[in-house]
Image (cartoon, rainbow, N blue to C red):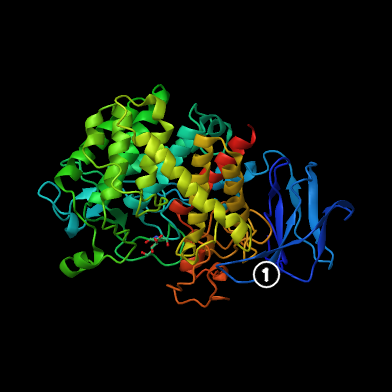
Amino acid sequence: AQNKQISDIRLNQIGFYPNAPKIAIITDNSSISFNVVRSTDNSKVFHGELKKIRAITTSQKETLIADFSAFNKVGRYKIESDKGIYSSTFDIKPAVHHTLAIAAVKAYYYQRASTALPEKYAGKWNRLAGHPDDQVLIHPSAATEQRPVGTLISAPGGWYDAGDYNKYIVNSGVTMGTMLSLYEDFPDYVKMVNTNIPESRNAVPDLIDELIWNLRWMLKMQDPNDGGVYNKLTNASFDGMVMPNITRLPRYVVQKGTAATLDFAAVTAQAGRLLKRYEKDLPGLADSCLASSKRAWAWAIKNPGMEYDQHMINEKFRPKVTTGGYGDKNFYDEFIWAAVELYITTGDVSFYRAVNILPDERMPLPSWGNVRLLGYYSLLRNETKLIDKPNNDIEILKERLIKTADRLLVGVSHTPYFAVMGQDQKDFGWGSNSLAANQGIALIQAYKISEDKKYLDAALSNLDYLLGRNATGYSFVTGIGVNTPMHPHHRPSVADKIVDPIPGLLVGGPNPGKQDGIALPSSIPDEAYVDNQGSFATNEIAINWNAPLVYLVYGIEALQFK
Ligand code: 9MR
């Protein structure tokens, strides 16, 4: 895929389901009407009038909406405006996003540390193993009597976090929680997706195999002496833009932290209940996850305020560590999430009672720094299995979730691209695309408890946004669509000399913050994106951004069958 001139007709560059909404946005406001035409011979199959929408918050540009929802014939088409503008080609068919579902999970295979990726699975992106991580140093910030400075530990495997080659527990937490929840919500669809990985032939679904790759690394990040979990496994400073096998810098585990330990406790508790059903294939794994979870929880109860403050650490210890911090300061949400997962898995309500689960009315969408909703979603999906059901917390949560979803719905008629995403300037921060995906997940949760299709349609509007119906005209997933990022801030994609970047990766997306100093084509929030490898503030990829994309795509594919 070479970047072509971006069309004035913006739409989901993959396509549409026969019986779901179908919208394209035309940015050339001199047009009046549009046709759907066959991609082969431009013959007309549908005609419609364009309707004006006026953006109220973001780009202030007038856009026109082409609604062809009424047209539902399977085929391959383009949109043509009366001014002779054409869109890219798209499909109308069932399971139209299935290929994306495969690619978005396969992306994690390409992020695997400490292993070679043979051509059989990685195609032209095959590469040598990087970062064995079997001789990891205890950084002075992490030294204890049992593990003094100079001790070597082994913590191989896991996924590289993002465009860099470090491995962070906090960010692994939200990533794993999101995808374990996907499996808990849609197990049948998950079982249908084959990603062609080395484990594909075993009895475990490929998504779960992929998650176990990272889970086994996470388990090694717990200090067996006290149950605390190190914040990260990292270089002292970022590697250059080289292939993973080139770098030989020493690796460290750094200070344990409350956020890392509780995220770990939540993930291992959730894995402890979900992996039980694969006991034959994964003997003992579920039980050891739960045991590790309980020990992590106990550590956090004893150390409830251990912040990972890299700045402070660098004042005291050498070498200085300058890689990503994920330095969360507020642990309330991690306590909620871990307490909920432990309660659901063990049935022991004392975990639930140890924390004020509903401290206020806020429903912050999940991010690495706020995991409260992961706990709430788990409560809702396990409602019928809860023993000792606490008060009327579930009813309160349902009400709050619907309220949150209703607030999101407003966006669809008030944004220039007719999506939920973009109704608030603040939507466009670092990793804004993951917010769009997380909004979609909240809407799917609302659909699940209400069965009201408007929430599912709204979730789909954000998938359309991510795949091209947006102010930049990009489909933000590498290799998926026509105008896709060719230069993501991703070391292997930059260093491998292959023209196409590694596929299936969601870039961060519009963010006017310019934290990387790279010029942007526009300072308007929803246009503030550049396909430049230096732009880590708009064009990096990250495991915590792909995860909600994976959830959104799988959820929508699964629910379209209904
Ligand atoms: O996604 C993170 C973003 O929310 C923070 O503002 C930013 C600065 O601390 O860091 C981002 O995470 C990066 C991490 O620190 C290191 N690996 C790459 C991550 C994505 O840019």
In the picture provided, is 234 more to the left or to the right than 8?
A: left
**Residue at label 1?**
62
At a point 57% along the width and 51% down the height, the residue shown is 504
In the picture provided, is 95 more to the left or to the right than 446?
A: right
Task: Confirm whether residue 256 shows in the render.
Answer: yes
Vertical side of 444 occupied by 279: above or below: above
Q: Picture quarter containing residue 339?
A: top left
Residue 541 placement (x, y as % from top left): 49, 58
Tag 1 secondary structure: strand
Residue 77 placement (x, y as % from top left): 80, 51
Q: Which of 15 and 539 is in front in this view?
A: 15
Task: Confirm whether residue 120 shows in the render.
Answer: no
Q: How packed is label 1: few (under 14 Cα within 10 Å), some, or many (20 or more)?
A: some
User: Regarding ligand 1, which quadrant of the image does it lie in?
Assistant: bottom left
Q: What amino acid does circle 1 point to?
A: Glu
Query: CB at mark 1 closer than 8 A to ligand 1?
Result: no
Q: Nearer the viewer, residue 60 or 541?
A: 60
Q: Picture quarter containing residue 120?
A: top right
At a point 40% along the width and 53% down the height, the residue shown is 367
Quarter occupied by the C terminus: top right
Q: Which of 6 and 534 is in front in this view?
A: 6
Q: Picture quarter containing residue 92?
A: top right
Residue 167 placement (x, y as % from top left): 36, 53
In the picture provided, is 356 more to the left or to the right than 144?
A: right
Q: Nearer the viewer, residue 236 or 227?
A: 227
